[in-house]
């Protein structure tokens, strides 16, 4: 069959196949392997995958020092553990999944001192060297107050980039911005000409080749600060018209849905008088309702509202995960503990059974990704004994993404 079909037709068929099948087909013949591993085909397959999976088809979760993955399903979520690069570190740190782009994950240890680019579909990985400290950090100056990252794709240069923002103790404002280029395997500083702002302890969300960070202006109101990966410039976007400015009773999260930036604003109330509450003030809040907005051509459009009586159970907050293929339901994460499909027609939520995750490992942080053939390999490995320092170069033949409280 392979000999009777023209290569153009074989290639077209391959672009519609899942990554797991293509990995097996590489062993069929040298011709098939050459097709599947070519840069041109990898881009064709990625474009086709993004067209067919606008809302992504997999969930990726970090829990303590483990990463789990599940295909998205309306019936049951079955999570399997994934071996990831940070497992090679001697101290096995907690894992933070910063963002997923084109099937590539940017992951970091809990203090965000060690970063890796990792594709769980083809197991390729790249150690991201530490960003150089800027002039605002001096000997004995202390440590950064907030250190946040973003990860995205620049179509102009066909490059994947990591952006790092740092805020120091001296002023309480962001003082440094640097960008890592995967193509150049190096960092460079970026001049931020926008007004001063304070960072929130949350990572950026990538949408339409921009990285969107939630920051606070001088009057403590939330603002979106967007970094354009193509021009390396910042812009500010105000939040939509909100029902209340009592930010102590609100949580806010961003998500890329259908390729657009979406904002979910949780409105909450105190369970008891704050003066009488014991323990962490966060746990003295309960969910009232949530509004979901979409940023469309610099304008916020309200999509829908989820109310307390539609959840059927007390909770503190919701996070968006993804839409269903028919766009009639949205998968939500509740308190980082359980998942449910919210029906946009009946306005009811149905809990989804989960396998492979333990409740004691919650709260979970769920993201979505598509399987891809894109490789990030740069042949650097990390020794378990030596921590984050690359040990040697190796050759591989394998083939090739309290107050105002924020949660992403």
Image (spheres, rainbow, N blue to C red):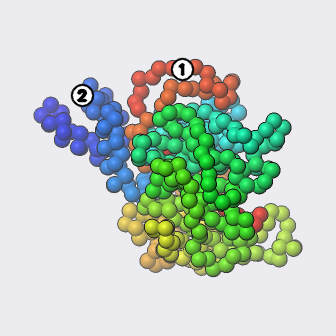
* Rendered location of residue 216, percent (x, y): 69, 63
- On residue 116, the disc is none
What secondary structure is found at the residue carrying circle 2?
helix
Horizontal side of residue 349 vs 38, given as left or right: right
Q: Is residue 320 above or below residue 246?
A: above
Work out whether residue 75 can be spotted: no
Looking at the image, residue 5 sits to the left or right of residue 182; the answer is left
Q: Quadrant of the C terminus?
A: bottom right
Q: Residues within 10 Å of mark 2 (few under 14, many from 20)?
A: few
- The residue wearing badge 1 is 393
Q: Quadrant of the N terminus?
A: top left
Does residue 297 appear left or right of residue 134 in this picture? left
Residue 270 visible from this viewpoint: yes
The CA distance from mark 2 to mark 1 is 29 Å
Q: For residue 35, which quarter of the picture?
A: top left
What residue is disc 2 on?
Answer: 31
Q: Which element is circle 1 on?
A: strand
Tag 1: Cα neighbours inside 10 Å, few (<14), some, or many (≥20)?
A: few
* Residue depicted at x 45% and y 41%: 159
Q: Earlier in the sequence, mark 2 or mark 1?
A: 2
Residue 79 placed where, x, y %? 52, 49
Where's residue 40, x and y in %?
31, 37
Would you say 405 lies left or right of 392 here?
Answer: right
Q: Nearer the viewer, residue 174 or 394?
A: 174
Name the residue: 38% across, 55% down.
53
Looking at the image, the residue that sits furthest to the right is 276
Residue found at x 87% / y 73%: 276
Q: Nearer the viewer, residue 245 or 238?
A: 238
Q: Residue at x 73, y 69 (%)?
A: 219
């Amino acid at each position: 069959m392979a000999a009777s079909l023209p290569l153009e037709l074989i290639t077209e068929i391959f672009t519609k196949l899942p990554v797991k099948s293509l990995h097996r087909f590489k062993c069929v013949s040298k011709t098939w392997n050459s097709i599947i591993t070519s840069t041109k085909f990898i881009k064709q397959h990625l474009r086709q995958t993004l067209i067919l999976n606008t809302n992504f088809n997999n969930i990726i979760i970090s829990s303590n020092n483990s990463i789990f993955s599940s295909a998205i399903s309306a019936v049951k979520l079955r999570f399997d553990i994934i071996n990831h690069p940070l497992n090679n570190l001697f101290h096995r740190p907690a894992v933070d999944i910063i963002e997923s782009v084109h099937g590539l994950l940017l992951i970091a240890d809990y203090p965000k001192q060690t970063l890796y680019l990792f594709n769980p579909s083809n197991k390729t990985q790249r150690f991201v060297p530490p960003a150089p400290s800027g002039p605002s950090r001096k000997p004995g100056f202390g440590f950064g107050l907030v250190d946040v990252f973003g990860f995205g794709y620049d179509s102009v240069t066909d490059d994947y980039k990591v952006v790092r923002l740092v805020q120091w103790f001296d002023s309480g404002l962001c003082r440094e911005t640097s960008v890592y280029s995967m193509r150049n395997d190096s960092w460079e500083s970026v001049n931020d000409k926008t007004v001063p702002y304070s960072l929130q302890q949350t990572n950026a969300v990538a949408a339409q080749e921009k990285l969107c960070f939630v920051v606070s202006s001088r009057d403590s109101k939330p603002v979106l600060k967007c970094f354009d990966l193509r021009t390396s410039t910042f812009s500010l976007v105000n939040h939509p018209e909100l029902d209340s400015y009592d930010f102590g009773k609100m949580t806010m999260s961003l998500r890329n849905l259908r390729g657009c930036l979406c904002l979910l604003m949780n409105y909450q109330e105190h369970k008891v008088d704050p003066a009488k509450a014991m323990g962490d003030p966060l746990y003295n809040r309960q969910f009232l309702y949530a509004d979901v907005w979409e940023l469309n051509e610099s304008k916020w459009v309200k999509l829908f509202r989820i109310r307390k009586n539609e959840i059927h159970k007390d909770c503190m907050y919701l996070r968006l995960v993804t839409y269903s293929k028919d766009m009639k339901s949205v998968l939500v994460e509740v308190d980082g503990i359980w998942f449910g499909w919210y029906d946009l027609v009946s306005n009811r939520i149905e809990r989804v059974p989960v396998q492979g995750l333990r409740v004691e490992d919650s709260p979970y942080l769920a993201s979505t990704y598509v399987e891809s053939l894109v490789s990030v390999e740069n042949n650097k490995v990390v020794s378990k004994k030596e921590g984050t320092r690359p040990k040697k170069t190796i050759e591989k033949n394998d083939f090739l993404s309290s107050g105002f409280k924020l949660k992403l």
